[in-house]
Image (spheres, rainbow, N blue to C red):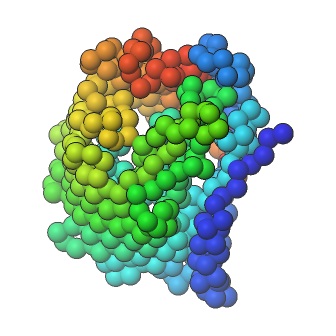
Amino acid sequence: MTSITPARPRLSLYLAGVMALLSPTLAFAGEWDFSGSVAGELRLFPSAPAYMNQEKMTLSPSVALEMELVYEWNDAADRLSFVPFARLDADDQNRSHYDIREAKWLHLGDGWDFVVGLDKVYWGVTESRHLVNIINQDDAIEDLDGEDKLGQPMINFNLEKDFGTFSVFVLPSFREREFVEQNHRLSGPVRIDASRATFEADSGNEHVDFAARWKHVFDDWDVGLSHFYGTSREARLIPIQVDGETILAPHYDQINQTSLDVQYTSGATLWKGELMSRSGQGDRFWAFVAGLEHTLYGVLGGRADLGLLVEYLYDDRDPLQAPVTTADHDIFAGMRLALNDTQDTSVLFGGIVDHDNGSTLLSIEAERRLSPNWKVELEGRFFVNIDAADPSHIFRRDDFLTLRLLRYF
């Protein structure tokens, strides 16, 4: 029987504390807004699994619900947001889960603002990899691409000046990463037991992390400089023996990461780059993503726009000391087509090729509105010519297509 994995008890307590703090404000006159979406999803795995322990299902259905409740008062200077998310998967019990994506109070001042609660923060400019986007933990059981994030408890203060916007984050609690169950697709041959996670910090997942960021726009330049200190969102997987079985246990190191993201606009071309340096996982290492997106306007009869994307990915981490990555010496190329029609039809297609061994990940994302309240999405991931030494070799037979129908309300 499929059940939904609950949120961590301490997360529920944190949320309850925030709501109790804010509840007196609800007595004042304000405006409520409620919206959301429900999605039916089918995942197709066209190939047989690579490992005997994996279920041989070809079609995997699930349903997801996301809602947003917003309350504004004080002439919209104060805003309370609550965004829960839940998925029920017919096959993978771990993928049946719920999370609070946002539960925050935002107050806007004169040139400053602060946020208290759970929130999602995005940093970065590149397409193929988001090196600098470190505040939130990946919701890794939703997808492989790192786009889905868990809500992060935080206190965030932002100050806007003529010479840039300064942001400070206090992150009082850590969200551990969940992993796909071993007997399901998109898992490896060795079981990962998230319940046996260990931490470098004595306070474990209660360690208080800190981050700071400065961003500014100089004419055609968008620049961001950030630093993070705290528990790594990436886990090293450590082999351990449990009752004669070898399993992998996540270990979370304490890290310092400094990063820079830059975007330069030159006519129809966006030049993009992200650079980061990290210590705390063996020797200090560097990584960067750099490339461009050039847009051809008025194609296909004059209405559509076609963006051409190229990026180079580099990472010099030691895989014996730091979490494993596939993006150590890779090239990404893709194209983004926007039809600019009334249905907002768009397609993004791309591929990442390992320069050393030729392993290739192809991806496609397409969407189209069927009506003001209905939308259809198609996503695909295809693992091509995967080398036996490549970390993605465990997914070599896990190509999949996802068809999603969404109803907005």
Exactly how many numbered labels are in the figure? 0
Q: In which quadrant is the N terminus drawn?
A: top right
Q: Position of residue 385 (x, y in %)?
A: 42, 11
Q: Quadrant of residue 301?
A: top left
User: In this orientation, does residue 302 appear?
Assistant: no
Q: Classify 110 as above or below 46.
A: below
Q: Classify 246 as above or below 124.
A: above
Q: Position of residue 402 (x, y in %)?
A: 62, 27
Q: Position of residue 14 (x, y in %)?
A: 59, 72
State the residue in front, 187 or 409.
Answer: 187
State the residue in front, 74 or 151.
Answer: 151
Q: Classify 82 as above or below 407.
A: below
State the residue in front, 192 or 67.
Answer: 192
Q: Could you tell me which residue is drawn at 17 percent across and 69 percent down?
A: 163
Left or right placement of residue 211 versus residue 154 in this view: left
Left or right placement of residue 332 versus residue 144 in this view: left
User: In this orientation, does residue 121 appear?
Assistant: yes
Q: Could you tell me which residue is drawn at 60 percent across and 23 percent down?
A: 401
Q: Classify 402 as above or below 248.
A: above
Q: Position of residue 39 (x, y in %)?
A: 69, 41
Q: Could you tell me which residue is drawn at 44 percent across and 46 percent down?
A: 235
Q: Quadrant of residue 72?
A: bottom right
